[in-house]
Image (cartoon, grey):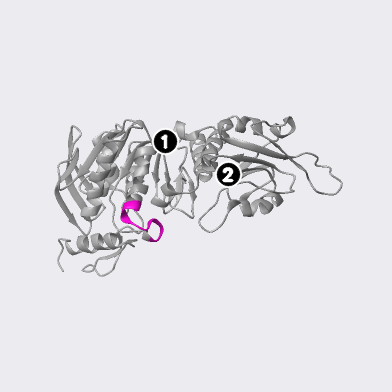
Amino acid sequence: MKLSCLVNNIKGQIVSVSYPVDSRNKSGLFKVGVLKNVFPRNTLGININGLAINSKLVKESYLFFCLSGTHCKGTDFINEAYSNGAKVVISQESIKTKLPIVIIRVKDAIQCLASLVGEFYDYPSDKLNMTAVTGTNGKTTITFALENILRAFRRKTGVIGTLNYRFGNNVFIGQNTTPDIITINGLLRQMVEEKIKFLAMEVSSHALAQRRIEGLKFNQAIFTNLSQDHFDYHKTKNNYFLAKSILFTDYLKNGGRAIINTDDAYGRRLAGLIKNNKKNKVNIISYGIKNKADIIAKDIYFDCNGSRFMVEGLKHKFSVETNLIGVFNVYNALASIAASLALGIPPKYIAEGLKSVFVPGRLEKIICRQKDISIFVDYAHTEDGLKNILLSLNELKVYG
């Protein structure tokens, strides 16, 4: 893709453009000229083969974004980016260099990244029905449940989350629950090419605070709960909550759906925040067990083999039987049920999908030769998550 096609999307963001005046300078040094909001023709014709925010991932004719992190500046890696083949650099900071490279200084590098990555990959997010899931606990289980329900409904689904990124026959192990926006768009582009129609995606508080999903708009978003976690990064519980809330105030489509656990105090606070948000209109669907909600679970029973309960709400009433164990997993199932009903999936397919759902490492039962012993493996790593696991196991209605 030509640079000219990309920069048309960020004209209002450009502060200045620096470019080598004479790339054949005999001394080996390159003079730099600065033009405000104007590109010389010889730079507009540069062919861009890819985008990168990591200098180590830059290849020939890439555009490199200088994004500063917690411990280092993006501008520190320009030399490496150039050595690996970068032809153009976008930066929010002023850069002085003698490298024969085009430098575009902008007001907001992350916003420009979102605009350019969308254009580069032909806006794949617009071609998918996307559900985001956030909260301290339950994100992975809900994306697995949604995937299995959509599979029962004969719909191809992609998943981006903690365990992996997957669609069709493709499985990728990622470093983060929510990857960077370039990786996300690359995955979404592949999904579109494979005729995937739905996406279930875990969105972490770190990703929201760092604007890793900038440029995306979700059809619906789920809030599970909020307990003590990530205080090393967010410092306070209020900051942690505000990071989560951005998903619902900034990244939902107009008319999108916010699916919220209103048994959780922060869920109720989030519902109030959304109602007062003037940016766009969002429809709230509440779910719970203890309090009045749009969709609730009744007559709950679980043992070491799974759970069963009755679902009521959104003009439906039906029974569910699932491999998922514990009250906290009833909440996770309710979230996936609410999202599925909002997508127009009939209850029989929802029940079918939940009956066979399996989530590795989430209260996963281990086959044991001794029939009077039940062994489980769980990923719980927060105080609240571990408490939920132990309470649920303690309540199992089995002998011993």
Is 3 placed left or right of 140 in the picture?
Answer: right
Instruction: Decide whether the magenta segment is chiefly helix, strand or loop.
Output: helix
The answer to whether residue 334 of the structure is visible from this angle is no
Image location (x, y in percent) of residue 65: 59, 45
Residue assigned mark 1: 217
Q: On the rendered image, what quadrant is the C terminus found in?
A: bottom left
Q: Residue 108: x, y in percent? A: 53, 41
Q: Earlier in the sequence, mark 1 or mark 2?
A: 2
Q: Quick check: 74 left or right of 144?
A: right
Total numbered badges shown on the rendered structure: 2
Amino acid of disc 2: Gln
Q: Quadrant of residue 327?
A: bottom left
The boundaries of the magenta stretch are: 232-240
The local secondary structure at tag 2 comes to loop
Q: Are marks 1 and 2 in contact (CB under 8 Å)?
A: no
Q: Nearer the viewer, residue 130 or 374?
A: 130
Residue at the farthest left position: 299
Distance of label 1 from label 2 (alpha carbons): 24 Å
Q: Nearer the viewer, residue 102 or 16?
A: 16
Residue 257 falls in which quadrant of the image? top left
Q: Which residue is mark 2?
A: 92
